[in-house]
Image (cartoon, rainbow, N blue to C red):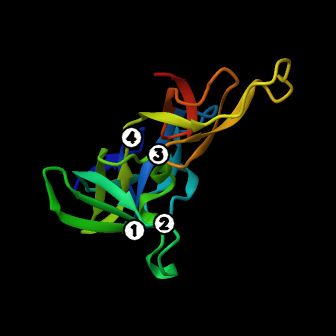
Amino acid sequence: MSLLEYNEIKERKYIIYENEPYEVLSSHVFRKQQRKPVNATKLKNLITGSVKEISFHVSEKVEEAEIDSKEIKYLYNNKSSLPADRQGEYWFSEPNDPSKRFSLKAEVVGPAGQFLKANTVVSILTFQGRHIGLKLPIKVELKVVEAPPAVKGDTAKGGTKQVKLETGAYINAPLFINEGEVIRINTETGEYVERA
C-alpha cells in the first residue's frame, strides 16, 4: 500500500479517507499569502456516493486505495413485477461466459444504471472483496424511443425537451431531436452530448 503526498492527490485517483474508499473528483494546489500550500479536493465516497470537500496540508499523507476492476457484461434488470426485496436488481455475467451470472443491488450500480443497455460491457469496481460500483464508458449511444414534437417558437424552456431513451431513462435534449434517432449521452453527468 502506497502513501500519497498532499500534492499527489489528483483527479481519477482512489484514496482511503476515514477508512473508506474515495475517488478524487477534483484537486487544486494553491498557496494563501505566506502560508504553506494546500490541496483543496472534492472527494466522492465510493460506497455511499456522497461528495465532500476536503483540504490536505503539506504534512498530510493519505493511503492510496487498492480498487480492483474487472470487465462484466450487463444482461438485464428486474422490474416491478417482482417482490419488493427482488426489485432493483441488475444482472451481469462474465463477458465470455453467460452461465456465470450474478446480481448487484441498484444502490451499488448507482445512477449510471439508467444508461445500461443489454450486452454492454462495463467494469465493476471492488474494494477489499466488496463490490462498490460500476465504471461505464464516459459516453454511450442510446436510441430515443419517445420525443414530443417541437413546437415552433417554443424556446422559453431554453430550447430543450424531455426525451425517453431505450433504457427507460429520461433526459433533456435539444428541440431538434426526434424519436428513432441515436444520441450520445455523458454517463457521468447524465446530459445530452450530440447526435450519433
Location of the N terminus by quadrant is bottom left
Q: Amino acid at mark 1?
A: Asn
Q: Tags 1 and 2 in contact by the CB under 8 Å rule?
A: no
Nearer the N terminus, badge 2 or badge 4?
Answer: 4
10 Å neighbourhood of mark 1: few (<14), some, or many (≥20)?
Answer: few
Residue 91 shown left or right of residue 94 in the figure: right
Nearer the N terminus, badge 1 or badge 3?
Answer: 1
Q: Amino acid at mark 4?
A: Arg
Position of residue 185 measured from the top left corner of the image (x, y, whole percent): 50, 33
Task: Please tell me the numbered disc located at residue 79.
Answer: 2
Q: Residue furthest left?
A: 97
Q: Amino acid at mark 3?
A: Phe
Task: Please tell me the numbered disc located at residue 12.
Answer: 4
Nearer the N terminus, badge 1 or badge 4?
Answer: 4
Q: Tags 2 and 3 in contact by the CB under 8 Å rule?
A: no
Q: Secondary structure at mark 4?
A: loop
Q: Secondary structure at mark 2?
A: loop
Say which quarter of the image contains residue 40: top right
Q: Amino acid at mark 2?
A: Lys
Location of the C terminus by quadrant is top left
Position of residue 146 measured from the top left corner of the image (x, y, whole percent): 61, 38
Q: Secondary structure at mark 1?
A: loop
Alpha-carbon distance for marks 1 and 4?
19 Å
| Residue on which disc 3 sits | 115
Q: Is residue 64 visible?
A: no
| Residue on which disc 1 sits | 19
